[in-house]
Image (cartoon, rainbow, N blue to C red):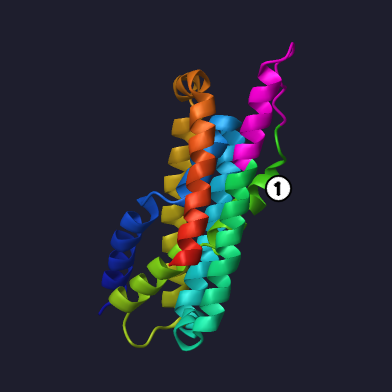
Amino acid sequence: MTFTLALLNVALIWMFAVATPGANVLLTVNTALHYDRKLALFSAFGVSTAILLWAFFGGSGLVILFTHYPQLFGFMKLVGGCYLLYLGIRQIYQTRKSNALMTGANAPTVSFPSSKKIFLTAFITSILNPKTGFFVVSVFSISMPAHMTGWMVFAIMLTMSSITLVWHVFLGVAFSRQSAKSVYQRISHYIDYATGGLFTLFGIKVMAS
């Protein structure tokens, strides 16, 4: 398999993988709707940085450790699932708190988190997501030749990370538009509860899989 053909295979598979709805996509969309475009872009950077690291794991063969040491993968699923549960429960709690304040005399003020916090949340969510690891294993098992050079691994890392960044930047820009925010504001409490519930379900599914 030629170098160019391998990269094309990676790009094609990863475009489908990265667009699959999951915790990473939900986090970027949620950030765009809740805050602004700038923070949504930091979420995109956090996810794409984690994918760069995942691609390195795949290219260096570290992902194979999961097949030889299932206890390690089980531990990762437990940690990742617990983190997603935390995100879900926190979202539900904050929504309940916001709704309670709305019934009072004063509407709650929206407190924007720092760019660093958004970046780290997105990075941790993606790096602890075993689903991402499954996709990486699929890419390297289907598309890669038996022997890879360092340059090929580096090119694959950049390809996967760039595709992820472009998709999440698109999500951040699309859902931070005023038209999207106007729809969100009308049904925000339903969306926020649904988001918290989905994160919680993702966490349970990760631990149970």
Looking at the image, which residue is at 48% across and 25% down? 177
Helix, strand or loop under label 1: helix
Residue beneath the point at 43% across and 51% down: 22
Q: Which residues are magenta?
A: 91-111
Q: What x and y, as percent, mark residue 49?
A: 56, 59
Q: Quadrant of residue 94?
A: top right
Residue 121 percent across, percent down from the top left: 63, 51
* Vertical relation: 113 (above or below) 116: above
* Horizontal arrangement in the rendering, residue 46 relative to residue 160 (left or right): right
Residue 101 painted magenta: yes
- Residue 53 versus residue 18 in the image, above or below: below
Looking at the image, residue 115 lies above or below residue 103: below
Q: Quadrant of residue 144?
A: bottom left
Are there few (<14), some (14-19), or many (20+) residues within 10 Å of tag 1? few
64 in the magenta segment: no
Instruction: Give 70 or 165, whichever is nearer the viewer.
Output: 70
Tag 1: amino acid: Lys
Can the viewer see residue 132 in this picture?
Answer: no
Check disc 1 and report the residue beneath it. 116
Q: Residue furthest top?
A: 105
Residue shown at 53%/31% (left/top)?
33
Residue 110 visible in rendering:
yes
Quadrant housing the C terminus: bottom left
Residue at 39% from the left image edge and 49% from the top image edge: 21
* For residue 101, above or below residue 56: above
Residue 138 pos. (x, y %): 34, 72
Report the side of 185 relative to 86 (left or right).
left
Which image quarter is the N terminus in?
bottom left
The residue nearer to you, when weighing 46 against 99, is 99
